[in-house]
Amino acid sequence: MRTRLLLAAGAVGAATLGLVGTGSFASFTSTVAGTNSITSGTFQLQAEPAGTPTVSGPLVGDAINGGQPTQNLVATSEPTVTGQGNTLAYTLANAAPGDAYSYTFNVYDVGTLQGQVDTITYSPGSQGTALEAQMTVEVQEQVNGTWTDVHNSSASGASGSPLPASQAHTYYLDYSFGPAFLQPNTLSSSGTPSYTGEEASATFRVVFTFLDPTTNPNSSSNNHVVNQNTAEGISAAPTITVNGTNTP
């Protein structure tokens, strides 16, 4: 509160001091609001076939009518659930002892955050173990133009593939050439990436080898043909899963 001192006129010859105009100022309040919009980023893997599957073996192409292996690899579209990768479907018919079958695919990060592929897991199917017992599985990454085995441990000196296809395995990319780093990318409906520079994608190859009866390490020398026949005419459904992690 503040006061003022005034000189007021009074009777002649006299002066009076008076205190007038006392009071207080009004107190006003005000607020201002700011809205916030925060959206988290996404890290999402997508796989696309790279070329056609291949087969190699001593008698490939030798049959005159039929009997040749057939392979196919297709990818589903990008999933609608954020964070979940799509699916590769690999089919192989007429697998035969002594032959090796391989398919190649590219992995992209179609989210908005960078990340890395650090492990690949293999799981044998719930059926067809007699067939998988006669096969090996090998996972490779293309590093500087060379197919390099992905190892079955993150420890130095870990062995690489191939490994028995009848058992579950984890392949670690952090040994010996490190994880596969991926930058955010977008793919067209045909799978063409918008970004093709360094770390645009990672390329992997999976190789299934049907062991030859004469060199089958899972059977003794006197009954390997009998054991091999248990794999005739049956199917197997193993899975390969590519696992990635966002890297801030």
Image (spheres, rainbow, N blue to C red):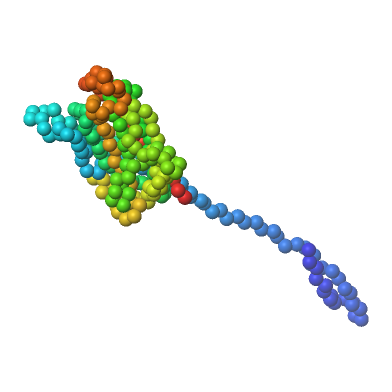
Image quadrant in which the N terminus is located? bottom right
**Image spot of residue 58 (x, y percent):** 17, 34
69 w.r.t. 128: above or below: below
State the image quarter where residue 45 is shown: top left
Q: Residue at x 80, y 71 (%)?
A: 4
- Decide if residue 112 is in sight here: no
Q: Residue at x 36, y 41 (%)?
A: 150
Asked whether 191 or 23 is in front, the reply is 191
State the image quarter where residue 117 is shown: top left
**Image spot of residue 10 (x, y percent):** 87, 76
* View extreme (front): residue: 221
**Image spot of residue 105 (x, y percent):** 28, 42
In the displayed structure, does residue 222 sit left or right of residue 34?
left
Asked whether 123 or 40 is in front, the reply is 123
* View extreme (bottom): residue: 13
* View extreme (left): residue: 64
Q: Residue at x 47, y 50 (%)?
A: 248
